[in-house]
Image (tube, rainbow, N blue to C red):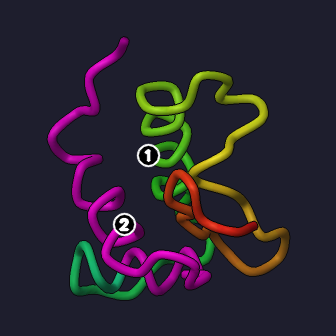
Amino acid sequence: VELVPPHDLEELLALAERPGRVLSREQLFQIVRGDELDAFDRSIDVHISRIRAAVESDPKAPRWIQTVRGVGYVFTPPGAER
């Protein structure tokens, strides 16, 4: 089991507080950093990747933090309908 780095916990918390709601990279950045995301900034993607490595049994096939292609990320809590 890996630990989630402290600075990545904010992204995890932002998603977990909004289960089932798709958040764009821009929305996540705004919630966590309170600033606008640069179009070329991929830091959110890196953070999500690290979070998945820590919390998913198979980060390549995530169950809890899913990518909604072209939109963003969504948190689906264990036991929730997909």
Q: Residue at image x 23%, y 60%?
A: 10
Q: Nearer the viewer, residue 18 or 51?
A: 18
Image coordinates for residue 50, horizontal then vertical, percent: 46, 33
Residue closest to the far left: 6
Q: Is residue 77 left or right of residue 81?
A: left
What is the quadrant of the N terminus in the image?
A: top left
SS at mark 1 in the image: helix
Q: Nearer the viewer, residue 13 or 6?
A: 13
Q: Amino acid at mark 2?
A: Ala
SS at mark 2 in the image: helix
Q: Tell me where the magenta segment starts and ends, as one range.
A: 1-29
Q: Nearer the viewer, residue 76 or 3?
A: 76
Mark 2: few/some/many CA within 10 Å (<14, 14-19, 20+): some
| Residue 19 among those drawn in magenta | yes
Vertical arrangement, residue 67 with respect to residue 50, above or below: below
Q: Residue at image x 50%, y 59%?
A: 77
Image coordinates for residue 5, horizontal then vertical, percent: 23, 33
Q: Which residue is mark 1?
A: 47
Image coordinates for residue 56, horizontal then vertical, percent: 55, 31
Mark 1 or mark 2, which is nearer the start of the sequence? 2
Q: Residue at image x 42%, y 76%?
A: 28
What is the quadrant of the C terminus in the image?
A: bottom right
Image coordinates for residue 24, horizontal then vertical, percent: 59, 81
Q: Which residue is mark 2?
A: 16
Estimate the spatial distance between the alpha carbons at disc 2 and disc 1, rounded to whole Å: 14 Å
